Image (cartoon, grey):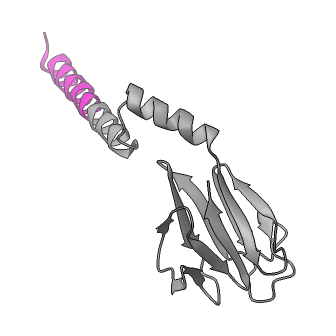
Amino acid sequence: MSNGVLEVLKYFFLAILWLFFIYAARMVLVDARRDGRASSPLTEHREVEERRDPVKLRVIEGPYRGETIELANELTFGRSGSCDVSLEGDTYASSVHARVFVRDGEVIVEDLGSTNGTMVNHELAEGPVIVDRGDVIQIGSTVVEVRR
């Protein structure tokens, strides 16, 4: 064979080898990003239990007192009509104030850069905060209690 053909084959082989390594690294990253829970009868039971027992947020103070909101995956709260829970009557709430979401079976509250902040159990939420049954979340003048 000529030197030119051998040179092309060498670079082709190296390209294939690099593609293999990139593919393997990508698969490792995809696995690392997953939630890490292995499928087992225990986790499957917990997922079924979570579906049967949805998280509910009961408004205990503010313009919508007495209403109950069901949390499936994620809700945004704020005065804007684009929010999942529009707090139009709450002058202390920002346009897009906070979000409440479920991740790995835990309920999490996160302030979205609001002017007045989001309180969890009367303390300012700095970053995402895990909440449990009975905890109270204050968004503007609206206060909701976490229920299951």
Task: Please tell me which residue is depicted at 66% across the width and 49% down the height of the picture.
Answer: 72
Inspect the magenta stretch and tell me whether residue 10 lies in it.
yes
Q: State left or right for residue 103 relative to residue 30.
A: right
Quarter of the image with the N terminus is top left
Whether residue 42 can be seen here: yes
Whether residue 39 can be seen here: no
Relative height, residue 31 to residue 62 (above, below): above
Task: Please tell me which residue is depicted at 77% across the width and 61% down the height of the picture.
Answer: 68
Task: Please tell me which residue is depicted at 64% across the width and 56% down the height of the picture.
Answer: 74
Relative height, residue 147 to residue 119 (above, below): above
Image x and y of residue 66, in percent:
81, 69
Q: State left or right for residue 72 relative to residue 102.
A: right
**Could you say which is closer to the camera, residue 20 or residue 7?**
20
Image x and y of residue 78, in percent:
75, 75
State the image quarter where residue 65 is shown: bottom right
**Could you say which is closer to the camera, residue 11 or residue 66?**
66
**Which SS type dominates the magenta stretch?**
helix
Q: State left or right for residue 2 relative to residue 23.
A: left
Label count reads 0
**Could you say which is closer to the camera, residue 30 or residue 58?**
58
Image x and y of residue 46, in percent:
47, 37
State the image quarter where residue 113 is shown: bottom right
State the image quarter where residue 51 is shown: top right
**Magenta region: which residues?**
1-21
Image x and y of residue 42, in percent:
39, 31
**Could you say which is closer to the camera, residue 13 or residue 137?**
137
User: Which residue in the rendered view is the most extreme toward the top?
Assistant: 1
Task: Please tell me which residue is depicted at 40% across the width and 25% down the height of the picture.
Answer: 41
